[in-house]
Image: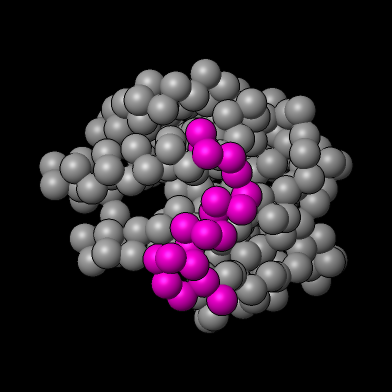
Amino acid sequence: MIDTEDKARAYVANLCDESAMERLERLVLALVEENERQNLVARNSLATVWQRHIADSAQLLDHFDQSERPWLDLGSGAGFPGLVVAAMRPELPVILVESRRRRIEWLEHCIALLGLRQCRVEGRRLELVDGFPAGVISARAFAPLDRLLRLSARFSTSDTQWLLPKGRSAAQEVQGLAESRRAMFHVEHSLTDPEAGIVIGRGQWKGTA
């Protein structure tokens, strides 16, 4: 279990190189500064920012099967998990979907600050983004699982990975899907919160939940 900032840093460092760690350090500094101007994350979470936000996002890479197709991050907000993934894997195409103007400006600022040439922002509601085949679909605190799946179905293929941190509701949300659909997903325990889970799946979502 990752329960200290030192453990969080060590865990993340084991998943990436020194250049990526430098980018993440710059991201953390920028986040702390920007959080004074807009409420990107809960203020009290900054004391454990590596555990709560960086390692929490980075752990998705433990479940990632390399794909040449883009990583699609829904409702990116402050940049978790998508911006962290882009900073750790700069060669990977990452698309951040965010509709709030100030969050869009923040994400675009970070992309420039960190030199992430393969990362870009789709600054509009997901419903307005043109469909394309995604290698990965991720989201943290975006929408309930059934609605998330319906909204993002057109981006999924038979090879698409779903990596969805869902907190303490993970197992309950999977159980809430139609019985014929539940087998597509399973829940892994989060490494940063013993009571939280990550919904993981693979395949194309069709129809309604």
Residue at image position (45%, 48%) is 80
Q: Pick the residue in front: 55 or 155.
A: 55
- Can you give x and y, in whole percent of width and height, for residue 98 in the image? 41, 36
Left or right of 65 in this view: 163: left
Left or right of 158 in this view: 133: left
Residue at image position (49%, 24%) is 116
Question: Would residue 178 be seen by someone viewing this image from the given angle?
Answer: no
Question: Would residue 115 be seen by someone viewing this image from the given angle?
Answer: yes
Left or right of 196 in this view: 64: right
Residue at image position (72%, 48%) is 64
Q: Quadrant of the N terminus?
A: bottom right
Give the prevailing secondary structure in the magenta stretch. helix
The answer to if 13 sits in the magenta stretch is yes
Q: Pick the residue in front: 151 or 112.
A: 112
The part of the image, by quadrant, that contains residue 147 is bottom right
- Judge whether 162 appears above or below 37 on screen: below
Q: Pick the residue in front: 166 or 107.
A: 107
- Can you give x and y, in whole percent of width and height, for residue 209 in the image? 69, 59
Q: Bounds of the magenta span? A: 1-20
Q: Residue furthest bottom?
A: 195
